[in-house]
Amino acid sequence: MRFMVMIKASPDSEADIDPEEGLLLKMGQYNEELVKAGIMIDGAGLMSSAKGARVTVDNGKAMVTDGPFSEIKEVIAGFWIWNCASLEEAIAWVAKCPIAHGQNRFEIRQMHELEDFGTEGEGYEQHKKVEAQLAAQKGT
């Protein structure tokens, strides 16, 4: 099962304050442990919401709200894509995470797999084609 683990923003991450070198090293070691365990598929830290936008599309028209966003609790500061056997395993890995930016709030969501929506029809075939194109771009 794939999970997206979202690291919630903090005042420091929203102020673009870089983590201390010791914490950066600990996070690098943690990520390396995730990779060696076959858990981590992808991940990245995100720049502050001041450098982003929220887009609402209504009948094909995009309405843009530029950052920064005032509700820090709704802002994501980073993410991982993990492959875990269960939600409980993902929670156990999150519990091992060094606390970045004084941050200790995470959200874990299981990702849909294409097969969750059935395995027949044009829609399924179109998505399989896109998956193959992505795999070719990655060289896998």
Image: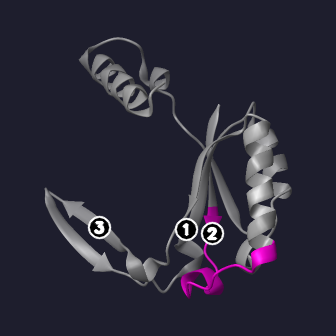
**Residue 21 belongs to magenta span:** yes
Whether residue 76 is visible here, answered yes or no, is yes
Query: Which numbered circle lies on residue 8?
Result: 2
Give the residue pinned by disc 3: 55
Label whose residue precedes the other's in the sequence (3 or 2)? 2
- Who is closer to the viewer here, 123 or 81? 81
Q: Which quadrant of the view contains residue 66? A: bottom left
Label whose residue precedes the other's in the sequence (1 or 3)? 3
Q: Could you say whether the residue bearing mark 3 is in a helix, strand or loop?
A: strand
In the displayed structure image, the side of residue 23 where residue 83 appears, left or right: left
Magenta stretch, residue numbers = 7-22
Residue 53 location in percent, x, y?
A: 34, 73
Pointer 1 with pointer 2, Cβ within 8 A: yes
Residue, x 56% and y 84% (percent of image)?
16
**Residue 137 belongs to magenta span:** no
Give the residue pinned by disc 1: 76
Badge 3 local density, few (<14 within 10 Å), some, or many (20+)? few
Residue 128 location in percent, x, y?
A: 36, 20
Amino acid on which disc 3 is placed? Val
Amino acid on which disc 1 is placed? Ile
Whether residue 104 is visible here, answered yes or no, is no
Q: How many marks?
A: 3
Q: CA distance from mark 1 to mark 3?
A: 15 Å
Q: CA distance from mark 1 to mark 2?
A: 5 Å
Residue 40 location in percent, x, y?
A: 67, 42
Residue 33 location in percent, x, y?
A: 80, 46
